[in-house]
Image (cartoon, helix red, strand yellow):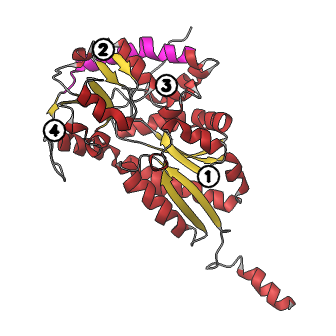
């Protein structure tokens, strides 16, 4: 009897034996119909993580739109323990924390490398916000492609957005649009096609690939690929109580696997995805799928400089004041230092 118990105990620590305690995770992903979920989230949670744990971790996966819940409720429900892991756009949660707007700042990053540098610099700030506000542990941040402008009507430059009603993809984008003379309108992603078709909005901001997948090309004519909406980062987070219930080895496996098998591949494809998506929407470039016929409107250097000037002189100082405390200085010390952009603070 003693020898049998001893052999069983030894087997638990020998290579080749299951090293992870059985864990079942309830996971809520981002939009079910968009490439981030289909190409990265779903394969990771349903296949890669269970395989990495030798079957010790199993996952029940759905998405917030499949559940019929608002994107802004995902992290609130996560903090309450309704599910174990939640993933959605950080901008959906800024009503709970204005400081979180500082993760996704328009115009600073025009390529994926700079966007990731910006997000990585912001991670300590984001980690603090999620722990304090949402009772959550941040596992990673993945991008949608940069948020560009779809218009149902002719535009030729950034100046042509003045006076137009535009669906903003986030709070800072809305502030920027208003500073440019447009009217920022709040419309959920799923309601945008109808709003464009009915004239509720003249233009709308989202990722080029998201707009392609959701059929925005059917109800808009012109595309301006200037990142007025930033990169719409998707935060991947776990309920903090659930995280703390895991042993250190399981925590390390999950965190490393998210970074290597979900977060990094999504970032690696982000720049190519933008170029491909613009080509598919406009016919300018090589498209592996079906090409649409939107008119490509290239923003001039003067357009981009004007928008950046407004960002740094009006939009970011306004955000620092709304966030309060030392968030503006923390942003300057982290994101600003990494990107060369500084918020003028009193």
Front residue of 251 and 330: 251
- As measured in the structure, the alpha-carbon distance from the residue carrying label 1 to the one carrying label 2 is 43 Å
Nearest to viewer (mark 2 / mark 4): 4
Quarter placement of the C terminus: top right
Residue wearing tag 2: 306
What is the secondary structure assignment of the residue under circle 1?
Answer: loop
Q: CA distance from mark 4 to mark 3?
A: 34 Å
On the image, numbered disc 4 is attached to which residue? 282
> Which residue is painted at 52% across and 63% down in the image?
49
- Find out whether residue 308 is within the magenta segment: yes
Q: Which residue is mark 3?
A: 336
Side (left or right) of 240 relative to 219: right
Whether residue 197 is visible, yes or no, is: yes
Q: Nearer the viewer, mark 3 or mark 2?
A: 2
Say whether marks 1 and 2 touch (CB < 8 Å): no
- Residue under pointer 1: 84
Q: Which stretch is magenta?
A: 298-321
Which badge, 4 or 3, is on the more N-terminal residue?
4
> At which x and y percent is residue 225?
25, 31
Q: Quadrant of residue 210?
A: top left
């Amino acid at each position: 009897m003693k020898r049998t118990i001893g052999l069983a105990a030894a087997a638990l620590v020998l290579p080749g034996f299951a090293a992870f305690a059985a864990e079942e995770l309830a996971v809520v992903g981002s939009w079910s119909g968009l490439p981030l979920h289909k190409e990265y989230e779903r394969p990771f949670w349903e296949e890669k993580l269970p395989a990495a744990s030798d079957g010790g971790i199993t996952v029940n996966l759905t998405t917030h739109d499949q559940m019929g819940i608002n994107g802004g409720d995902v992290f609130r429900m996560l903090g309450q323990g309704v599910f174990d892991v939640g993933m959605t756009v950080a901008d959906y949660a800024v009503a709970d924390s204005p400081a979180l707007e500082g993760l996704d700042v328009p115009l600073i990053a025009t390529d994926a490398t700079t966007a990731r540098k910006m997000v990585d610099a912001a991670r300590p700030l984001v980690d603090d916000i999620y722990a304090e506000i949402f009772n959550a542990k941040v596992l990673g941040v993945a991008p949608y492609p940069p948020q560009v402008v779809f218009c149902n009507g002719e535009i030729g430059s950034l100046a042509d957005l003045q006076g137009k009603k535009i669906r903003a993809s986030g709070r800072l984008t809305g502030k920027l649009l208003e500073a440019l003379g447009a009217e920022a309108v709040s419309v959920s992603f799923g309601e945008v096609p109808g709003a464009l078709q009915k004239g509720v909005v003249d233009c709308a901001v989202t990722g080029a690939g998201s707009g392609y997948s959701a059929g925005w090309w059917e109800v808009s004519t012109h595309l301006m690929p200037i990142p007025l909406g930033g990169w719409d980062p998707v935060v991947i987070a776990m309920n903090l109580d659930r995280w703390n219930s895991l042993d250190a080895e399981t925590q390390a496996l999950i965190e490393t696997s998210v970074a290597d098998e979900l977060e990094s591949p999504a970032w690696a494809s982000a720049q190519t995805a933008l170029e491909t998506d613009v080509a598919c929407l406009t016919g300018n470039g090589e498209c592996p799928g079906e090409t649409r016929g939107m008119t490509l409107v290239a923003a001039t250097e003067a357009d981009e400089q004007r928008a950046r000037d407004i960002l740094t002189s009006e939009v970011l100082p306004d955000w620092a004041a709304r966030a309060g405390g030392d968030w503006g200085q923390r942003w300057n010390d982290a994101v600003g230092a990494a990107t060369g952009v500084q918020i003028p603070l009193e």
